[in-house]
Image (cartoon, rainbow, N blue to C red):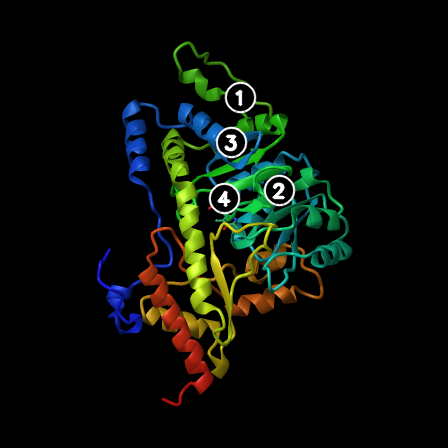
Amino acid sequence: MTTRINAVPHAVPAEEAAVPFADCHISTEAQTAALRVLRSGWVTTGREVAAFESEFATSVGAECAVAVSSCTQGIELALRSLGLPPGSLVLSSTMTFCGAVQAIVHAGLQPVLVDVDPVTGMPTRSTVRNAVRSFGPPAAMTLVHWAGDVADVPGLADAAELPLDRVVVDAAHALGTYAGSTPIGSGCGATCFSFYATKNLPLGEGGMVTTDDPARAEWLRKARLHGMTADAWRRYLPGGGWRYNVAEAGLKANMTDLQAAMGRAQLAHLPSWQRRRAQIAARYDDQLAGLPGVRLPHRPDPGTGTHAWHLYPIRVQLNGGIDRDEVIACLSERAIGTSVHFIPVHRLAYFSQAALIPSMGLPGADVLFEQLLSLPIYPRLTDRQIDAVCTAIADLAHQGLTGKGTE
Ligand SMILES: *Cc1c(COP(=O)(O)O)cnc(C)c1O
């Protein structure tokens, strides 16, 4: 980090102003914890996992937490725990990560893609009802708190005529999201978190499923490790028996103690990391508000919740015909990394066949996709880097106004 006074950002040479899109910060405490586990002689699922589960459950206000190898596997397990007949319909937003819909397929169920409001990036009661009208009543739905914003879980479950325990929340973006004053993690069938390298609590890989139903947690605990009778790992402890039984086809989706020990250490940093994410979002807001052709991310109305700011997705529709892809290219020339979350699932070849898509298409997601642009946001992003990103976008927005190609 430099202590130099802010230079005029666009005058800073590219290599100095470089702003990577993402950052995977493994704190020194997590590194120490990893070493402790590596030296302990027990690296796979064990005591650290049990401790991480209980600390995580407390932090999101859930009864139970079951650690898994990824959020994707967590969603598949959560759906399997519903015990639905094969081929049952499961609603999912099309504006999500492909893995979340792969999970529906791998659970033996039929994904039905739901359109989104281009302003919030999430389904509405009306888009949910359209999907239900097109294909009939679903057996379950997955709901993503897109970008870390608050999805209306009760309202959308109601529109789908589903009880809340048939809703699997994809909280890959929502560690740190609050609905009202309640953290995301309870109140529905299951909630699935991701600890992938770019997420708000990065471990590299890993996931957690929370639920208020101890019987479901018990089922998940077996199903994540080959369906073996609970606490199979205790077999290897002194006094542990070698016998086990298998009641059904489980997955291999357990978390290791190495990840869990890191997770416990990372969790202690989460509140300060979340405060920094909110500061970054506010700084972006200040500098980008009012720029021609730039729309700020949607956020919860005051008093209705807290955004986790996993992503900061702006919408760009610049004058002068500069499209989103050109904005990405121009920013990249200034060594500023950006991304797009997401390519709507219905536009991916496999899902255009394998998923059910209403005949009127998913126009809200298509419109949004053309304009979407995720800016860098992570706790170690500096004010100077934020300012460099904003200056670059402001230059493009104003260049668009004066007409591209006139220089
Ligand atoms: C990252 C992500 C996932 C997948 O998480 P993994 O832990 O990598 O499996 C699922 N859904 C959404 C919305 C994501 O962004």
Q: Position of residue 91 (x, y in %)?
A: 67, 50
**Mark drawn on residue 58:** 3
Question: Which one is nearer the viewer's eye here, 288 or 125?
Answer: 288
Residue receiving disc 1 = 230
What is the CA distance from the residue labelled 2 to the residue labelled 3? 19 Å
User: Could you tell me which residue is drawn at 49 percent across and 45 percent down?
Assistant: 176
Is residue 330 visible in the rendered image? The answer is yes
Contact? badges 4 and 2 (CB < 8 Å): no
What is the CA distance from the residue labelled 4 to the residue labelled 2? 15 Å
Could you tell which of marks 1 and 3 lies nearer the N-terminus?
A: 3
Q: Quick check: 371 left or right of 158?
A: left
Contact? badges 2 and 1 (CB < 8 Å): no
Q: In which quarter of the image is the C terminus?
A: bottom left
Q: Position of residue 304 (x, y in %)?
A: 61, 50
Q: Quadrant of the N terminus?
A: bottom left
User: Could you tell me which residue is drawn at 34 percent across and 56 percent down?
Assistant: 381
Question: Which one is nearer the viewer's eye here, 272 or 377?
Answer: 272
Q: Quick check: 373 left or right of 110?
A: left
- The amino acid on which the numbered mark 4 sits, given as a three-letter code, is Leu
Could you tell which of marks 2 and 3 lies nearer the N-terminus?
A: 3
**Callout 1 crowding tier (Cα within 10 Å): few <14, some 14–19, many ≥20:** some
Residue receiving disc 4 = 175
Residue receiving disc 2 = 168
